[in-house]
């Protein structure tokens, strides 16, 4: 039986390692897009190969707008990762999502000033992104969390802001009235790049606060967030340990062929330098 494909886990604020890994290795991956956030920790959870990347680096040293998203996702893809679970701290924009609840967003809204793509340099691609999240991977996470007794919410919209400051009340109220569910500073770029890299991705959005729209609550502060981060990290570790064995061994979901209808530039026009740069992503198109 062939070795199953690898699983990537991107840890957010408060989650800098995962428990239960055996056969641990560290990987300092050189990428065409610079260095990833940190060394990538490889290991086994049961019979599955897992690679863990702390988004903000161990010690939480990188601001949201400083994150090397392309390097992070390229590095995971180069290690054979085809499924990615993103764990991220978020603020709640709705009453029904309380601190320490877990939201599995299905949609995103971009309020950033950033562009994230692997393409350019002579190769044009426009991936379909109407449904950004892998619904099947989301379903597996939902089942794992519910079985452990956590309050899970499947669906909803994650609005991505620049940061690093938290929202003003005016911003928070506007996002809330537009019907958005949670707010964060990092995850949309990861989801976009995972789609371009033909990796199935789902997000565990861990509620830490009510942003600042809930006037009867204290405005969000770093101190208040950290208290919930610790509890959320423990919940995330338990869910990850339960869901990893349920992830398919083969990469045969629609997300794993996202580039089939996305590449606009004819193969004969692809610059050799760009092909080399994107080798982990374009390999199945250039190997024949």
Image (cartoon, helix red, strand yellow):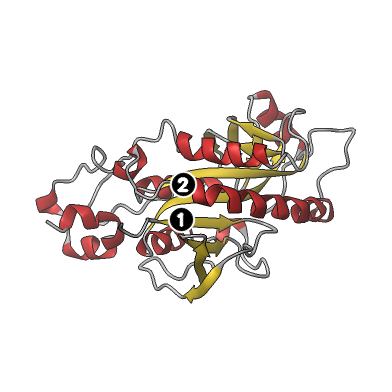
Residue found at the very far front of the displayed protein: 1
Residue 188 or 114: which is nearer the viewer? 188
**Residue 230 visible in this rendered orientation of the protein:** yes
- The mark lying in front, picked from 1 and 2, is 2
Provide residue 78's location: percent of width, then percent of height.
36, 63
Provide residue 147's location: percent of width, then percent of height.
66, 39
Residue 131 or 9: which is nearer the viewer? 9
Mark 1 to mark 2: distance in Å? 8 Å
Q: Is residue 144 above or below residue 48?
A: above
The residue labelled by disc 1 is: 7
| Contact flag, marks 1 and 2 (Cβ < 8 Å) | yes
Residue 94 or 148: which is nearer the viewer? 148
Packing grade of label 1 (10 A; few <14, some 14-19, many >=20) is: many
Viewed as shown, does residue 204 lie left or right of 100?
A: left
Q: SS at mark 2?
A: loop
Provide residue 68's location: percent of width, then percent of height.
49, 62
């Amino acid at each position: 039986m062939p070795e199953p494909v690898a699983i990537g886990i991107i840890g957010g604020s408060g989650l800098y390692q995962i428990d239960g890994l055996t056969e641990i290795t560290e990987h300092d991956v050189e990428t065409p897009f610079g260095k990833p956030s940190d060394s990538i920790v490889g290991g086994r959870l049961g019979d599955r190969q897992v690679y863990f990347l702390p988004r903000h680096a161990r010690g939480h040293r990188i601001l949201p707008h400083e994150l090397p998203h392309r390097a992070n996702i390229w590095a995971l893809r180069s290690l054979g990762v085809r499924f990615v679970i993103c764990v991220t701290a978020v603020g709640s924009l709705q009453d029904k999502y309380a601190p320490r609840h877990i939201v599995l967003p299905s949609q995103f809204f971009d309020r950033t000033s950033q562009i994230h793509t692997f393409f350019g340099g002579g190769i044009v691609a426009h991936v379909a992104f109407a449904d950004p999240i892998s619904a099947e991977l989301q379903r597996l996470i939902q089942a794992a969390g519910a079985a452990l007794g956590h309050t899970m919410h499947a669906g909803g919209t994650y609005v991505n802001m620049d940061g690093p400051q938290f929202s003003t009340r005016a911003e928070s109220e506007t996002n809330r009235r537009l019907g958005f569910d949670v707010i964060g500073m990092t995850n949309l770029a990861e989801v976009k790049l995972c789609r371009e890299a033909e990796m199935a991705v789902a997000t565990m959005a861990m509620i830490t606060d009510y942003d600042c729209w809930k006037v009867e609550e204290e405005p969000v502060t770093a101190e208040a967030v950290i208290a919930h981060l610790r509890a959320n990290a423990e919940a995330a570790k338990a869910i990850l340990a339960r869901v990893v064995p349920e992830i398919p061994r083969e990469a045969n979901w629609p997300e794993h062929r996202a580039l089939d209808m996305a590449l606009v530039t004819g193969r004969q026009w692809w610059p050799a330098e760009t092909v080399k740069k994107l080798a982990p992503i374009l390999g199945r198109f250039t190997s024949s």
